[in-house]
């Protein structure tokens, strides 16, 4: 017993929670399997490593700020027009090394946010520093940073340190001149240092209306986003509405966009 207490104490002092969790069970296993002492120690270290990796992933997931956790396992490809092969390719996360942005366009309810979350989730599992934020919240943060004279800090420390920035719902917002400029700064920052996933229910021709009717700025933003990217244009009607209609809950026959 004393030995166990001593081990537990050392584990706490040296911060080895994985060892603490596994050493006893593993010792029994090792005795049964007649393992060499070195093999036992090796397996114990493996547990500690696994535990640390998992901790790191949990921290990254928390920092990513996902509104809910959704994975690709709950995405029903059969009722979506999205290119399944391309989503699978994206989920290998090769796009991160290739620094390709991802643009998810399409009407409301077709799963753009779901897919963006699933990709962000997969990135945190691979220990990629990720931040998920709605376009509206991003603008609020930018404006308050600017007001506090901390815009440079915000761009460098908050946006610049994230490898994958997910901007959700670049939908029908009406940005004023300052907001449009701030938005450009974000896109520009990530163009230089990382990559962006953006979801929008607007086709590109309408982006100018959001961006204060500034043609040059819109062109500069689209150029940076599209230049090296995967573009997913998802067609179809809202997944939930379709489900309800198919279940006979809605009495109108179709709701096409
Ligand atoms: P969008 O962002 O395109 O407006 P969401 O991703 O928010 O749409 O989808 C709306 C709801 O429908 C969410 O709960 C999402 O999980 C679900 N959903 C959409 N498409 C699918 C799909 N193909 N399979 C499973 N769930 C889906
Ligand atoms: Mg959405």
Image (cartoon, rainbow, N blue to C red):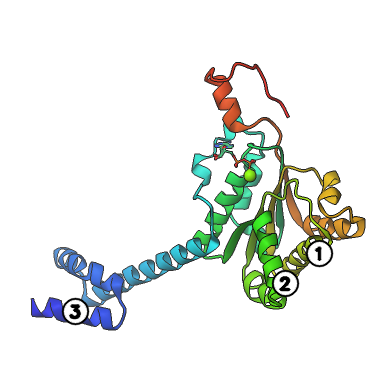
Task: Please name the residue that numbered disc 1 is placed on.
Answer: 178
Closer to the camera in the image, 122 or 186: 186
- Mark found first going from the N terminus, 3 or 2: 3
Disc nearest the viewer among 1 and 3:
1
Asked whether residue 187 appears in the rendered view, the answer is yes
Question: Which residue is drawn at the image coordinates 71% and 37% (left, top)?
Answer: 107
Question: Which residue is drawn at the image coordinates 46% and 64% (left, top)?
Answer: 57
Dot 1 lies on which element? helix
> How far separated are the C-alphas under marks 1 and 3?
60 Å
Disc nearest the viewer among 3 and 2:
2
Closer to the camera in the image, 134 or 144: 144
State if disc 3 and disc 1 touch (CB < 8 Å). no
Asked whether residue 44 appears in the rendered view, the answer is no
Give percent across and percent down for residue 194: 68, 67
Local crowd at mark 1 within 10 Å, few (<14), some, or many (≥20)?
few
Q: Does the residue labelled 3 lie within 8 Å of ligand 1?
A: no
- Numbered label attached to residue 146: 2
State if disc 2 and disc 3 touch (CB < 8 Å). no
In the displayed image of the protein, which residue is found farthest to the left?
A: 1
209 relative to 107 in the view: left or right = right
Local crowd at mark 3 within 10 Å, few (<14), some, or many (≥20)?
some
Task: Please name the residue that numbered disc 3 is placed on.
Answer: 7
Question: Which residue is drawn at the image coordinates 50% and 40% (left, top)?
Answer: 74
Dot 3 lies on which element? helix
Give percent across and percent down for residue 246: 56, 20
Q: Quadrant of residue 191?
A: bottom right
- Mark found first going from the N terminus, 2 or 1: 2
State if disc 1 and disc 2 touch (CB < 8 Å). yes
């Amino acid at each position: 017993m004393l030995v166990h207490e001593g081990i537990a104490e050392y584990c706490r002092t040296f911060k080895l929670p994985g060892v603490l969790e596994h050493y006893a069970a593993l010792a029994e296993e090792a005795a049964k399997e007649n393992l060499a002492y070195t093999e036992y120690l090796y397996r114990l270290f493996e547990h500690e490593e696994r535990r640390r990796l998992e901790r790191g992933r949990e921290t990254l997931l928390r920092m990513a700020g996902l509104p809910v956790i959704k994975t690709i396992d709950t995405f029903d490809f059969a009722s979506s027009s999205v290119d399944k092969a391309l989503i699978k390719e994206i989920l290998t996360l090769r796009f991160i090394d290739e620094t390709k942005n991802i643009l998810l366009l399409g009407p409301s309810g077709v799963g753009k946010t779901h897919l963006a979350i699933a990709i962000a989730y997969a990135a945190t599992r691979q220990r990629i520093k990720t931040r998920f934020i709605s376009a509206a919240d991003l603008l609020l943060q930018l404006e308050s940073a600017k007001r506090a004279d901390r815009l440079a800090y915000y761009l460098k420390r908050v946006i610049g340190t994230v490898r994958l920035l997910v901007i959700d719902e670049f939908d029908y917002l009406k940005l004023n001149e300052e907001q449009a400029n701030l938005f450009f700064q974000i896109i520009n920052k990530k163009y230089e240092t990382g990559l962006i996933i953006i979801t929008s229910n607007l086709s590109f021709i309408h982006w100018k209306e959001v961006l204060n009717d500034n043609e040059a700025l819109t062109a500069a933003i689209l150029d940076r986003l599209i230049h090296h990217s995967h573009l997913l244009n998802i067609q179809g009607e809202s997944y939930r509405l379709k489900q309800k209609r198919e279940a006979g809950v809605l009495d109108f026959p179709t709701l096409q966009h």
